[in-house]
Structure formats: structure tokens, C-alpha cells
Amino acid sequence: MTSDMWASEIFDDSFRISVKVREKLFDQTGPFQRVEVFDTERWGRVLMIDGLFMTSDRDEFVYHELLTHPALCSAPKIERVVIIGGGDGGCAREVLRHPGVQSVSLVEIDSLVVEASKTYLPGIGTAWNDQRLEVRIEDGIKYVAELPPASTDVILLDSSDPVGPAEGLFNASFFAACKRALKPGGVLALQSGSPFLMQKVFRDTQHVLAQHFACVAPYFANVPLYGSAIWSWTYASDQPSRYPHIAERWAPIAETCKYYNPEIHDAIFAAPSYVKKLLE
Ligand code: SPD
């Protein structure tokens, strides 16, 4: 018997992307949001939060490798890493592939996301038992505000889109707190929305980051589940320009990367003309 259940994300009440579902594995609404996990034919397991697709077995590698490795393969130091959000474990998995990383704090506001992911997305969070990883269920905004100044080498914001609990992760005071927590020369990387489907979020995020960081460099790729449109991440630091790729950081991850590589490291920073115009 085939299912006729579909999971859909609706953009601006005008465009919908749907995935045919084999079985719904998890559906709970907690104090923060509704968390759903689906088993699907084409995408494998899929995580949805408040009606937005977060990640899937099939295309998560693009998102997680690009959130992590451009920062980790170029930041001057990577011993101490903080991840805000990232409760599915995919971002932590990629960070922990780097032997130079000594400690990672993953700060996720919603325990439901971590519980559901540990149980139903075993292919994504494969590093939960790594001794270098500390998982904290608490508000990432408060956590960063309370970090000792200049204590962190790399901060990664693996958030949902800026609605609901993630809204405060896209504003000036939070970016100022990130800058304060980073060591001089430290790197912040974040998901910054689609410059095609979410132009205002993308542009505002760049402008607000530029109030705090000397280098603000968006980069781009397609994550098919995110509306099948171009997606962006942003690399920010207090230095005037991006750090170059470090070959020794690439060697230990070369075997496992399915998207990122040294050529991609620079190529992703090329912006389409309409995006350049958007940022003028
Ligand atoms: N439109 C969805 C954007 C979601 C970005 N974060 C995904 C979390 C995956 N770890």
C-alpha cells in the first residue's frame, strides 16, 4: 500500500515544496516548537520544525559541510568551538572530524530536537559520544552573552530561519555578543537564508553583521530541500578579509567530505550578479 501523505513547507503563502512521506516517525509540540520526523522515499529521514524543513538524510551533507569547513579550514585557531542550535548533531559531526578541535559546546534550546534526532536521525548525528562534545539544553543567546570575553575560536550558528525561537539569533545585539566571545581573529559562521527566496532576511543579516565585523563574506550553494533555491551562509571575522584555506586542516577530512574541498572553499564565495546588486 502506498502512502498519500505529504510533508510541505510553504513560502510566503505563495510557493510550496512537498516531500512524499512513507511514515511519520515523530510529532511532538513542546514549549518552543513543533518537531516532526518523517521517513520518506526520496530524502530518507527528514526533520521538520514548525513547518520548515531542517534537514534530510539525502542532502544534509551540503548544509553541514558548508556551515563548518570554510570556517574550520581557515580560522587561525580551532581548539574551542561553540555551536548554537544544531540539535540534529550534523554540524557537531563535521566539526569533530577536525583533530585540532579540543572542545565543542553544542547549545540547543529545545531538548525535543536532540531527543528526536538521536532516536530517528542516526545517520546525521554520528558523533554524540565524542568525548570532546558537550551538549547543553539552554538558550544560546544567554549562553553566548555569558561566555568569557575572547574565549572562543569559532562560533557556528546552526539555526532555523528567523521566526520563533531563532529570531533573536539574527540581530545586532546577538552578533555583538558573538564578537565579544570570539578571540581576536576568531571566526563566526552562520546560515543566512536564501538570497532568492528570502531576500530581506539575507540582506538585513549581511548589513547587521557588517556593524560588528570587518569581514562579512556570504557564500552560496544549493540545498535542494530548502526550496530548491540557492542558499547562503556567512563567514565573519574581525580581520579585513577571509583567511586562506589551510591545507593541513583539509587532509584529515578529505576522505569524508562529499561537497566541500579546497576549490569549493573559494568558489562558493562567488556571488551571482543579482545577489551583488541586492547587497549594494
Ligand atoms: N529553511 C531551513 C533552514 C534551516 C537551517 N538549519 C538547519 C539545521 C540543520 N542542522
Image (spheres, rainbow, N blue to C red):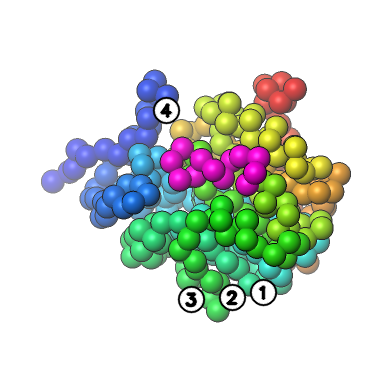
Q: Which quadrant holds residue 100? A: bottom right
Q: Amino acid at mark 2?
A: Arg
- Residue at position x 47%, y 71% from top? 128
Residue on which the image places disc 4: 11
Magenta stretch: give its range.
163-174
Residue 190 shows in this picture: yes
- Residue at position x 49%, y 44% from top? 166
Number of numbered discs on residues: 4
Label 1: how many residues lie within 10 Å, few (<14), some (14-19) or many (20+)?
A: some
**Left or right placement of residue 8 versus residue 260 in this view:** left
Query: Are the residues tagged 3 and 4 within 8 Å (C-beta)?
Result: no
Q: CA distance from mark 3 to mark 2?
A: 9 Å
125 lies above or below 198: below
Q: Amino acid at mark 1?
A: Gln
Q: First in sequence: mark 2 or mark 4? A: 4
Residue on which the image places disc 1: 102
Q: How far across and down, in percent of the image, does residue 59 sit?
A: 48, 48
Residue 164 sits inside the magenta stretch: yes
- Secondary structure type for disc 1: loop
Q: How far across and down, in percent of the image, does residue 255 sit?
A: 62, 65
Residue on which the image places disc 3: 129
**Nearer to the camera, 156 or 266:** 156
- Residue at position x 48%, y 60% from top? 138
